[in-house]
Image: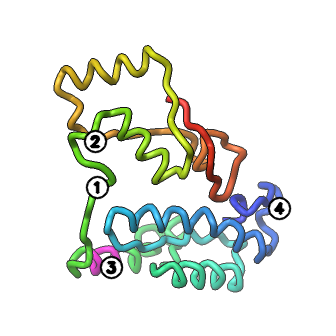
Amino acid sequence: MKMNGGVKKEDLGKENIEAVKKGCLNLGRHIENVKQFGVPAVVAINHFTTDTETEIQAMKDFVKAQGAEAILCKHWAQGSAGIEDLAKKVVEIAESGASQFSPLYPDEMPLFEKVNTIVKRIYRGDEAIADKSIRDQLHAWEQAGYGNLPVCMAKTQYSFSTDPNLRGAPTGHTVPV
C-alpha cells in the first residue's frame, strides 16, 4: 500500500499513514474492478511485521467505505492458519448467493474491441493501440473461430498503466498491444 502511495522500498518499514491512504487509491480501483463483474469483494491485507495498527486500521476503514470487507492475513508467518479467516470469508461469500456475475463484454464482441473494453473499464486507459500485424492476427483468430473466447491480458503488475513507475490509480493512458 505504501509503495503505491509513493514510498521508496527502503522506507517501507516506517509508519506513514498518508502514504497508506494514498496507496489505497490503487486498492480502490481493484475493488471497483471486482464489483464491475457483479461479484462481492473481500480484501486480504498481507500483514508485514512493520505494519502499524494505525496503518492497518486505515486500510480496513478504506475498504469498508468501498463496500467490501478486509481480512488481516499473516500466512507468511503462520502458514495456512494465518489465512484461515480469509478462507472462511470467501466460502461464506461464495455460498451466500450474493454474486451476480456479469462479464465485461459479450462473447460475440470482436477481439480488439474486447481488448479496448478491458483497457477502458479495468485499466482506465483511453485506448489500446496495435499495429496492422497485431490487428491482422486478431482478425485471423476470429476467422479461425476463436473470436468468441474471452481475452486475457498481461502487463506490468506495478501499475494500471504499462509504465511500472506510474503508481496509484492512473487514468488516461494508452496501452500498446
CA separation, marks 2 and 4?
40 Å
Q: Earlier in the sequence, mark 3 or mark 4?
A: 4
Q: Secondary structure at mark 4?
A: helix
Q: Residue 174: percent from the left, percent from the top?
A: 59, 38
Q: Secondary structure at mark 3?
A: helix
Q: Residue 11: percent from the left, percent from the top?
A: 82, 61
User: Is 27 or 70 nearer to us in this picture?
Assistant: 27
Which residue does the numbered mark 4 point to in the structure image? 11
Q: Earlier in the sequence, mark 2 or mark 4?
A: 4
Residue 92 among those drawn in magenta: yes
Magenta stretch bounds:
87-93
- What is the crowding at mark 1: few (fewer than 14 residues within 10 Å), some, or many (at least 20)? few
Q: Secondary structure at mark 1?
A: loop
Which residue does the numbered mark 1 point to in the structure image? 103
What residue appears at the point 63 percent right and 85 percent down from the top-left corner? 57
Label annotation for residue 150:
2
